[in-house]
Image: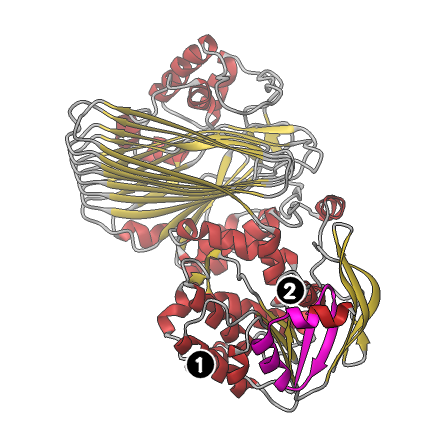
Amino acid sequence: MLKIKDLHANVEDKEILKGINLEVKAGEVHAIMGPNGSGKSTLASVIAGNENFEVTKGSIELSGEDLEDVSPEERAHKGVFLSFQYPVEIPGVSVTNFMKTAINESRKAKGLEDMPAKDMLKLIREKSELLEIDRKFLSRSLNEGFSGGEKKRNEIFQMAMLEPKVAILDETDSGLDIDALRIVASGVNKLKSKDNAVILITHYQRLLEYIVPDYVHVLHNGKIVKSGGKELALELEEKGYDWLKQETAV
Amino acid sequence: MAYTEEELKKELETKEYEYGFYTDIESETFPNGLNEEIVIAISKKKGEPEWMTLWRLEAFKYWKEMVEPEWANVHYEKPDFQAISYYSAPKKADPNKTLDDVDPELLEMYKKLGISVDEQKKLQNVAVDIVMDSVSVATTFKKTLAEKGIIFCSISEAIKEHPELVKKYIGSVVPQRDNFYAALNSAVFSDGSFCYIPKGVRCPMELSTYFRINQAGTGQFERTLVIADEDSYVSYLEGCTAPSRDENQLHAAVVELIALDGAEIKYSTVQNWFPGNKEGKGGVYNFVTKRALCEKNAKVSWTQVETGSAVTWKYPSCILKGDNSIGEFYSIAVTNNYQQADTGTKMVHIGKNTKSTIISKGISAGKSQNSYRGLVQVNSRAEGARNFSQCDSLLMGNECGAHTFPYIEAKNKSAMIEHEATTSKIGEDQIFYCNQRGIDTEKAIALIVNGFSKEVLNKLPMEFAVEAQKLLEISLEGSVG
């Protein structure tokens, strides 16, 4: 579904990604781990098409289509979703209004009419129940005054609403207490299907106890230095990243 | 990001002023220039009684001695007041018209403006008075209103039919010598709307005036007078458009509102005069004096959405004369390209326990300059006066400016005055967040701007709010940097 080949990317002439190769198939869950500054969030941004990053080499393909000249909003229409590590605030725009706009813009791009209000309300009700979100929450301004946990839960709510093909969760576990983590994880698990894929970016093994990955990759210094099954995460938890750094240096 | 200054500029070039058409209607236009003869001629043309002619001449006398104000934060080439025609009227307008008698070309124009008078009549329950160039051409719903004793007509008609009301109130809130433009307007005003709501009557529908400048080289000087008698209520809407022209057109209106004891007036404006082209050529100079007088327990709310005009100079104000009276000012001012706006309000607290609220939202894009200027004045006997002001500015790009000039004068120790101000910029991260959710940059800006302006948009009557939202989107198309 998502095929990344020899991806190199710069920010302000500094090379952050130095040749990433990754293939994610439908129905799979991949975890990308690695120390701070290894390029995890950059990879997420580049896949989403953030133009602050310049792709200097390599390619990203979604369902066989090269994304090079595809704008961020078109990537979203094609099913790329990024749960942001730091979701921004948009004062005066309610969560509901924001979602309504997002859904209808995607529909417009596909040549569909706006979603009827009745269906929209039904969808909102369904998905907010899935994530145990209080309906009052949905009329608040997007992310304004939200706690860290509320922001992350709201990201996953948006994922549920938009039903992406490939969802990238960038440190969705940070800032969540254990109950919120459980709710978010169970939401993601329910949204998972044989037709979509999830990429989890995380520092910690904790999230992976709830969302079990098929593959774990370790990113270090802009490259994937090790890949393995879910056991790799446990090994990392136990030994830290240093042993890997040493191992790859050799 | 998905936009650069270059791309922006390109996008801006494609942006057009939607109402920039000109309708070829036979008009009668006075020769350029202003002197006593012209003032008398205007008055005569309109068949006014002598007292009105004299009142105009008095204003003209004051005007000759006054100089144009220069304190506003705007820069423009001063209009040559002798190069303007002070009267232009569509020839076929008949003062005793009904809608059926209106020139079909005029009706065609209303359609272009998106105001199908007929439809509006039936569906929206809005009574409309349309002023084109200098003359009121159609007032709808008169009969329905008359049953309640409400008078809604052109000011020219009111001068003839209801001289006692006009004589008593005209100039009572904005005196002839109030300021340069008010004096000019008092001397040469051509038409405008008049409205009287009798005691205890709640006006059952929105009253609306639609202003349109059509002829080249003419100034438009409307005069609006709204009187809400004791314990009455009225909601009044005002919309403005003009054709795109290279030269600047002058618009200097005066609006006077009188809210007697216990009355409430809501006055909403959507101003979309031609803002000039992308190089800053042309556009309307909008120098307007709007003021309300609030008697005991009265309430006046000004709500304005200002997106047009090359230069805007406008401060809808409230004189809170009566005890417990309330003044409100809700404003969205958008400037793009080379537009300049210096706008705000004056809240003058005279009565005891008077309250005022000011919410001002300024949005600047392109190379525009957007200033809020507001005065909160509490007089010595205004025991318990309260004011809350909030001025928020939103910037787009790096070449525009937002300025806030709040003036506070408190002469009573019990006064409570609060002022809050914020300045923010639409962030790249906000745009990217929206993009990532499938919302393109244009739509993202519209969303963010609407969110920013929400508190004010919510104050507009329903049908106007939708129009205003659309207008915000059009005005800011392609303006992020």
A152 lies above or below B86: below
Q: Is residue B54 left or right of residue B18?
A: left
Total count of labels: 2
Please report, as a chain letter, where disc 1 is located: A
Q: State the residue in front, B7 or A76.
A: A76
The residue lying furthest to the right in this view is A57
**Quarter of the figure that contains the C terminus of chain B:** top right
Q: Is residue B215 left or right of residue B411?
A: right
The location of residue B130, given as percent across then percent down, is 48, 44
The crowding category of the residue bearing disc 2, from other C-alpha atoms within 10 Å (few below 14, some 14 to 19, many at least 20), is many
Helix, strand or loop for disc 2: helix
Separation of marks 2 and 1 at Cα, in angstroms: 23 Å
Q: Which residues are magenta?
A: A215-244
Which subunit holds the residue at mark 2?
A: A
Q: Name the amino acid, label 1.
A: Arg
Residue position marked by numbered label 2 in the rendering: A41
Residue B225: horizontal and vertical position, in percent? 35, 34
Report whether B2 appears left or right of B79. right
Looking at the rendering, which quadrant does residue A92 occupy?
bottom left
The answer to whether residue A238 is magenta is: yes
In the structure shown, which secondary structural element does the residue marked by tag 1 occupy?
Answer: helix
Return the residue nearer the eye: B240 or B76.
B76
